[in-house]
Image (cartoon, rainbow, N blue to C red):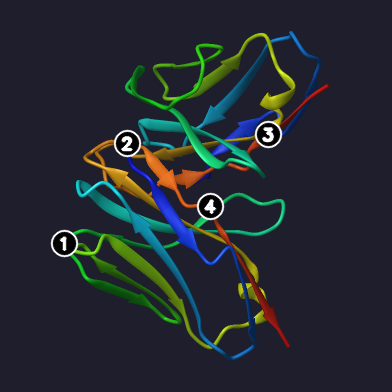
């Protein structure tokens, strides 16, 4: 089955700096890669996603890149703010099914 | 549109009991997926229901089961509860045609004593 690895597990950056979280996946048939943000005690919320026919997608301060050959995708957050502090999860699904395999999460802390 | 809702939000059970959790998807969504979230194992896929049929299943024992009703609401049941079943159970809904955004509910936090 699909396996998703995520690094780093924790990341501390100063406000205004950039943060990068990387994920690799194992199943070359995976074709959908969402990123979720989960604040303490809250539900995971989608922040951006990318499909396998696209190499990069950007939404304001957030961008995701996908390298299908290397089977990895990354989340980039620029100009970080304290409210970006949360746990971020990458995920991959396979085929047309709504089954997501999640990475282990990255705890991002943005310090003043 | 109203978001995904789950009931109950919190639940305390003892070992050996069984529990039923409910999930109401976003109106018009036909797919409901269930996930278990624990500090040790992270977010793990339990199963997915689409049009009242289980379409995908994760690697959980048969004590974990689910169903979906004609209005797309879904329930999951855990029988013979074990301490290790303590977790946040999240459901997510999507239209169901694949490669779509899944929207999560607030979760049900289950504590097994």
- For mark 3, what is the residue? B87
Pointer 3 and pointer 2 on the same chain: no
The residue sitting at 77% across, 13% down in the picture is: B15
- For mark 4, what is the residue? A104
Residue A50 lies, with reference to residue A59, above or below; the image says above
Q: Position of residue B18 (x, y in %)?
A: 68, 10
Q: Position of residue A3 (x, y in %)?
A: 38, 45
Residue B108 lies, with reference to residue A34, above or below; the image says above
Residue B14 in the figure: left or right of residue A99: right
What label sits on residue A53 in the rendered view?
Answer: 1
Per the model, the C-alpha gap separating discs 3 and 4 is: 15 Å
Chain bearing mark 3: B
Q: Are marks 4 and 1 in contact (CB under 8 Å)?
A: no
- For mark 2, what is the residue? A1
Q: Is disc 3 placed on a helix, strand or loop?
A: strand
Per the model, the C-alpha gap separating discs 4 and 1 is: 25 Å
């Amino acid at each position: 089955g699909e396996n998703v690895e995520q690094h780093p597990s924790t990341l501390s950056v100063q406000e205004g700096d950039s943060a990068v979280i990387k994920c690799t996946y194992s199943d070359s048939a995976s074709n959908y890669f969402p990123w979720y943000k989960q604040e303490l005690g809250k539900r995971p919320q989608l922040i951006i996603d990318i499909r396998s026919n696209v190499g990069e997608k950007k939404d304001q301060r957030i961008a995701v890149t996908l390298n299908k050959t290397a089977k990895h995708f990354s989340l980039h957050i620029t100009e970080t703010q304290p409210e970006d502090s949360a746990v971020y999860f990458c995920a991959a699904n396979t085929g047309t099914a709504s089954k997501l395999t999640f990475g282990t999460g990255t705890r991002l802390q943005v310090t003043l | 549109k109203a978001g995904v809702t789950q009931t109950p939000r919190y639940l305390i059970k003892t070992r050996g009991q069984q529990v039923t959790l409910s999930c109401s998807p976003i109106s018009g969504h036909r797919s409901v997926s269930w996930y278990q979230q624990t500090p040790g194992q992270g977010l793990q896929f339990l199963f997915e229901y689409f049009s009242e049929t289980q379409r995908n299943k994760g690697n959980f024992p048969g004590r974990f089961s689910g169903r979906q009703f004609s209005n797309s609401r879904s329930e999951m049941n855990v029988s013979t509860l074990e301490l290790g079943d303590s977790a946040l159970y999240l459901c997510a809904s999507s239209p169901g045609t694949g490669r779509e955004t899944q929207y999560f509910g607030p979760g049900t936090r289950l504590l097994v004593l």
